[in-house]
């Protein structure tokens, strides 16, 4: 089956009522037929639901779909993207292990790697976006390579093929945060990724309703990560799993429109008097546009640009928007604008912000599914006011 068909037709659950849409199973536990069934389920002699911290039919349906869509063996869903990222690391690494991660990385992931993992003896070093000089960072105890592409918020592109070769040569577990692309636009496993992690909160839900996360990957690694989740309990609720499984049915059509709108907006901004640099992976001016075209089906739904001026002009731009939402989320049907320098990255020093590619006038737009003319006219009028 093609991607679109799998996302719609891989329904695993149906009750005796023969409903067309998967029912919700809001139950904390499951009933055993008898003592023997109870014993054998607990002994892993047969598969079946026991308790919703372990498995739940709605979560299982979502996991099966995500594994197929990512082209990997198995998946486990979690209550948030950060729970998925944490489980993908803690389920596999131990004290004394070392991890390499690309510099341009989600803020909370950065915090986990720098402030929490060292408490348990797991250390981390940073890699440049360009894969050319990665070799020198490898140590005898390096176990995992973690990359995020496209990155949040800078839209850096990591060459997945080169990263995959590097991981293989050094026997590293290759873990990719595929949140911005989704499996519809990019399947990291095709380039050698052993694990793929997601914040389902973003495009996978796509409608700004639920938090969720997924780890998907190779069976032997997933077995450990599933055991970790089963005992530490970052489980996704059946309701959120049901929402997310339904959301996947429209992922392809939603992403097509997000990408169409984003490219039109990126081109419009590129010629705008009040705008400095514009970044979009499929814009010819992106430094890694050729790599993005090689590994992604389309450029995604995020566009970043520089409002001419600086902090003050950036803030005035946001205050002048009439339709776009000011919100911390992304990947929603509604277009959202954020100003990383005064919000998500305000705690960093100005130097550290620049190092991460976040200038004072940088605006991140999550381009929604409204009519592109309305998105552009709102941004255009706010840009004009920003310079007054
Ligand atoms: C939002 C996000 C996360 C974290 O996901 P939550 O669902 O908020 O926990 C991780 N990685 C990226 C790239 C994100 O954008």
Image (cartoon, rainbow, N blue to C red):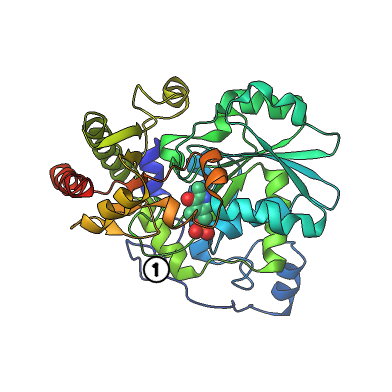
Image height check: is 336 above or below 70? below
**Total marks placed:** 1
Q: Quadrant of the N terminus?
A: top left
For this rendering, which residue is in front, 373 or 296? 373
Residue 190 percent coordinates (x, y):
55, 29
In which image quadrant can residue 108 be found?
bottom right
On the image, numbered disc 1 is attached to which residue?
Answer: 23
- Given residues 57 and 343, the one toward you in this image is 343
Q: Residue 15: in sight, yes or no?
A: yes
SS class, disc 1: loop
Judging depth in this view, the residue of 210 and 315 nearest the camera is 315
Around disc 1, counting alpha carbons within 10 Å, would you say few (fewer than 14), some (14 to 19), or many (20 or more)? some
Q: Is residue 271 above or below residue 101?
A: above
Vertical relation: 114 (above or below) 260:
below
> Residue 309's x, y, as percent?
32, 42
Q: Is mark 1 within 8 Å of ligand 1?
A: no
Q: Residue at x 77, y 66 (%)?
A: 43
Examine the image and state in which quarter residue 129 appears.
top right
Q: Residue 65: percent from the left, percent from the top?
A: 48, 49
- In x, y percent, where is residue 211? 46, 63
Asked if residue 296 lies left or right of residue 189, the reply is left
Name the side, left or right, on which 252 lies relative to 60. Answer: left
Asked where in the image residue 280 lies, by quadrant, the reply is: top left
Q: Residue at x 47, y 27 (%)?
A: 295
Up-down relation of residue 233 to residue 382 (above or below): below
User: Residue 63: in sight, yes or no?
Assistant: no
For residue 322, side relative to residue 251 (left or right): left
Residue at 63% across, 28% down: 163
């Amino acid at each position: 089956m093609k991607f679109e068909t799998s996302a719609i037709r891989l329904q695993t659950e149906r009750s005796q009522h023969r409903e067309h849409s998967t029912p919700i199973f809001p139950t904390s536990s499951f009933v055993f037929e008898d003592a023997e069934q109870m014993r054998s389920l607990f002994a892993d002699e047969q598969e079946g639901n026991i308790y919703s911290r372990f498995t739940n039919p709605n979560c299982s349906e979502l996991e099966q779909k995500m594994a197929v869509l990512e082209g990997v063996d198995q998946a486990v869903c979690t209550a948030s993207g950060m729970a998925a990222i944490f489980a993908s690391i803690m389920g596999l690494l131990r004290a004394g292990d070392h991890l390499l991660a690309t510099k341009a990385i989600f803020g909370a992931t950065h915090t986990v790697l720098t402030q929490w993992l060292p408490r348990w003896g797991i250390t981390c070093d940073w890699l440049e976006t360009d894969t050319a000089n990665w070799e020198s960072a490898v140590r005898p105890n390096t176990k995992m390579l973690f990359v995020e592409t496209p990155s949040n918020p800078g839209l850096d592109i990591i060459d997945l093929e080169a990263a995959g070769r590097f991981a293989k040569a050094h026997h590293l577990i290759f873990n990719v945060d595929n949140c911005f692309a989704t499996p519809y636009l990019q399947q990291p496993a095709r380039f050698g990724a052993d694990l793929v992690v997601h914040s389902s909160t973003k495009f996978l839900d796509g409608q700004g309703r639920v938090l969720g996360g997924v780890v998907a990957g190779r069976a032997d690694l997933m077995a450990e990560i599933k055991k970790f989740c089963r005992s530490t309990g970052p489980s996704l609720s059946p309701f959120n799993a049901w929402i997310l499984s339904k959301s996947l049915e429209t992922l392809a059509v939603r992403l097509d429109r997000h990408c169409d709108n984003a490219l039109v907006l990126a081109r419009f901004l590129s010629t705008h008097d009040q705008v400095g640099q514009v970044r979009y992976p499929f814009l010819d001016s992106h430094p890694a546009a050729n790599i993005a075209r090689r590994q992604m089906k389309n450029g995604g739904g995020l566009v970043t640009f520089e409002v001419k001026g600086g902090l003050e002009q950036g803030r005035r731009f946001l205050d002048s928007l009439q339709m776009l939402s000011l919100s911390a989320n992304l990947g929603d049907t509604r277009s959202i604008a954020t100003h990383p320098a005064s919000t998500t990255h305000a705690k960093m020093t100005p130097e550290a912000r620049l190092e991460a590619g976040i200038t004072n006038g940088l605006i991140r737009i999550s381009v929604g599914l409204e009519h592109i003319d309305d998105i552009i006219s709102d941004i255009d009028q706010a840009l004009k006011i920003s310079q007054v």
